[in-house]
Amino acid sequence: MDLHFTTDYTAIHEQVNRIDPVQYGHTRNYVQGAVTYLSPYISRGVISTKQVLERVMAKGYTIQEIESFVKELCWRDYFQRVAQTRDVNTDIKQAQTPVSNYEIPLAVLNASTGIEGIDTAIHQLYQSGYMHNHCRMYTASLVCNSAPSHWLLPARWMYYHLLDGDWASNACSWQWVAGANSSKKYFANQENINRYTNTQQVQTYLDTSYEELEKMETPFVLSDTTTIMLETTLPESEFIQIDPNLPTFIYNYYNLDPLWHKDEPGNRILLVEPDFFVKYPISEKCMDFMLSLSKNIPDMQLYVGSFKSLLDNYSIENIYYKEHPFNIGYRGTEESRDWIAEKITGYYPSFFAYWKKVATHLSNKYGK
């Protein structure tokens, strides 16, 4: 299935209007299910989980009717809360074990694992910058639990290619599969993969019971591993003009919200920090996607350099930016992002502990 993600702001909101949250709940686990394809716009901060929820609830649904859909929105907020309080670059709850290497199987990189549902999903990732959530879990299980490679480099590989790359969500999800952020590892056998990816494979190395999968030695096809260099191609820096009498609004990879201070005059700067993209590299496709989305914001100027160098070179004051766990070294007025439940903060050891609080909040807001 060929996918193309528009960067037109009006078209994105039309996509929000077409959400069928009931059908989503029934079919979201299937690769051809009624998923929304909104995750790239949520991750880039073009729209928020709260905006999407409010738009859907305005159609008259109850939380109970669309609970599966609402939970998926809240998972995104939950992972951001985890990243506010934990270093998601390290094993969060306990060390992943066993680990035979800190590389990635070549068969995964080459989409030649022999598991059709996974190989097709990897090809789609390279082609479109998207992978269905179930396929992300299948891929992570193959890498971390069948190989078994440590989760960090493979998670960076997947993030590198994802248009909806959100490092908190991605890292925490890989750790969940690998057992570093959960009470047990996640496995998927061939029967499960066939069911949700519309394949009919038999007699593969995954065509066995879950009990056998957990005891299985590394399949030969996954035994050859390699390291990879992930590099970001940065755009050319532009000459920017600053009006010192106006506030300056800082946008970045995680905040491209066209409605943020929309009617207020100001200097609007898309900050592309080289050091950030060394630590969290992205593909050229992802960079182009960000730059294209930024064009929805009038008078946006592009600055390639650190936050500090921006201040040093332009003597900027009266700065505003949206909160994000990876805004390192920012100074000025930090404004809250658009949370579904803004007052429910701190670390919750499981999503379900977090959801219990959020569900009460939503019941109070929208009624039973």
Image (cartoon, rainbow, N blue to C red):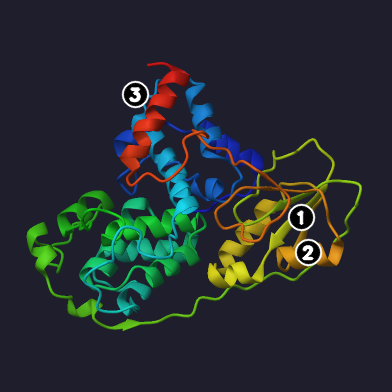
Q: Find the distance from the CA under tag 2 to the CA under tag 1.
A: 10 Å
**Identity, as a three-letter code, of the amino acid under mark 1:** Ile
Residue 358: percent from the left, percent from the top? 41, 31
Q: Residue at x 24, y 78 (%)?
A: 100
Viewer-closest of 247 and 71:
247
Q: Does the rendering let one see residue 265?
A: yes
Badge 1 crowding class, 10 Å Cα cut-off, few under 14, some 14 to 19, many 20 or more, is many
> Of discs 2 and 3, which sits in the foreground?
2
**Helix, strand or loop at disc 2?**
helix
Q: Which residue is mark 1?
A: 269
* Circle 2/circle 1 CB separation < 8 Å: yes
Tell which circle, 2 or 3, labels the residue nearer the N-terminal end.
3
Q: From what the image shows, is residue 231 above or below residue 203?
A: below
20 to the left or right of 254:
left
> Which is nearer the N-term, disc 2 or disc 1?
1
Q: Is residue 96 left or right of residue 166?
A: left
Q: Quadrant of residue 89?
A: bottom left
**Residue under pointer 2:** 310
**Disc 3 from disc 1: Cα separation:** 41 Å
| Cβ atoms under marks 3 and 1 closer than 8 Å | no
Give the mark nearer the N terminus: 3 vs 1.
3
Residue to which mark 3 is pinned? 64
Q: Nearer the viewer, residue 80 or 346?
A: 346
Mark 2 or 1, closer to the camera: 2
Q: Determine whether 72 is above or below 196 in the image.
A: above
Count residues near mark 3 (Cα–Cα under 10 Å), then give few for <14, some for 14-19, many for 20+: few
